[in-house]
Image: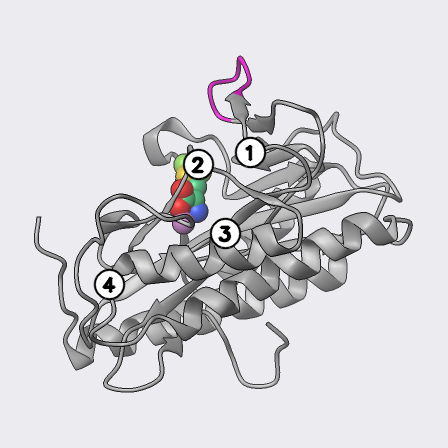
Amino acid sequence: MAVSIKSNAEIELMREAGRILALTHDELAKRVKPGMSTLEVDRIGEEIIRSYGCIPSFLNYNGYPASICVSVNEEVVHGIPSKNRIIQEDDIVSLDAGVIYKGYHSDAARTLIMPAVSDEVKELVKVTRESFFEGLKQAVPGNHVRDIGKAIQEYAEAHGYSVVRDLIGHGVGSKLHEDPEVPNFVTPRRGPKLRPGMTLAVEPMINLGEYDVYWLDDDWTVVTEDGLPSAHYENTILITDGEPEILSTAPGITL
Ligand code: MF3
Ligand code: CO
């Protein structure tokens, strides 16, 4: 399938979706604390998203039962919020959220560090975020989708980490998941050529140990095979004539 090129009007709606999503993550980062259940995190996140008049795009997506994916420690992605899962002082908490604004999506993830996280795991979170920015540098017209994943993988592996293979980034727009696939690792095919107007969700999932993962019996939660922690960082980006633009951001917030 051809990768869609967004019009200026569509990009404007995605900028607004992204701005609201960035503000949502910023507010969650301030409010999520040890002692809270992951269900409370979901409730707060949904309330913020709706307060901006947006729809949480994950809610009921393929039957997913919540608005925010809350994945703790060895949970890689798609953790289901639960009143019984209480965030601990030494947890890392990955929050993945999507919003729909006037029919257009933005998708972004952050990994939060609770106060007693070890330096070793803090470094994993830092490098995961940095690996996104390494990929971003390659998100320029004329390059191919594979150049993004190659940069992410090289950066993560140079730090001794591994890149999850069973989940990937994706195009995003009037649907949450569009073409192209955006792997965070090198693939045999170079993928589509990047062109101005393409909008992508680039989302490295980086493991402290080995890259293998499996699905829990809830059919959603993805966890590392070796039980070691995993971090996730994601933004919705726009390919332009020059430098890529991060759409899931807002003035005055830290990415
Ligand atoms: N950001 C996630 C992704 O791109 C979306 C979560 S899937 C959902 O795969 F079902 F939880 F919405
Ligand atoms: Co995504």
Look at the image and tell me whether residue 59 can be seen: no
- Look at mark 1 in the image and give the residue it sits on: 211
Residue at left offset 37%, top offset 61%: 148
Q: CA distance from mark 4 to mark 2?
A: 19 Å
Identified by mark 3, the residue type is Pro
Mark 1 to mark 3 CA distance (whole Å): 12 Å
* Direction from residue 243 to residue 241 in the image, left or right: left
User: x, y percentage for residue 99?
Assistant: 41, 57
Asked if the residues shown at circle 1 and circle 2 are in contact, with their CB atoms under 8 angstroms apart, the answer is: yes
Mark 1 residue CB less than 8 A from any atom of ligand 1: no
- The disc labelled 1 sits on which kind of residue? Tyr
Which residues are the magenta region? 215-220
Q: Quadrant of the C terminus?
A: bottom right
Instruction: Check if residue 218 falls in the magenta segment.
Output: yes
Amino acid at pointer 4: His
- The residue labelled by disc 3 is 204
Q: Residue at x 14, y 68 (%)?
A: 5
Label 4 element class: loop
Do residues under tags 1 and 3 come within 8 Å of each other at their CB atoms? no
Q: Which of label 3 and label 4 is nearer to you? A: 4
Work out how far the residue at label 2 is from the one at label 3, CA to CA, in angstroms.
10 Å
Mark 4 vs mark 1, CA separation in Å: 24 Å
**Between marks 1 and 2, how big is the CA–CA gap?**
7 Å
Residue 60 drawn above or below residue 34: above
Residue 151's spot in the image, x, y percent? 45, 61
Work out whether mark 1 precedes mark 3 in sequence or the reverse, and give the earlier one: 3
Per the image, the residue denoted by label 4 is 144
Sequence-first tag of 1 and 2:
2
Secondary structure category for the residue under label 2: loop
**Which residue is nearer to you in this view: 80 or 212?**
212
CA–CA distance in space, label 3 to label 4: 17 Å
- Which tag, 3 or 4, sits closer to the chain's start? 4
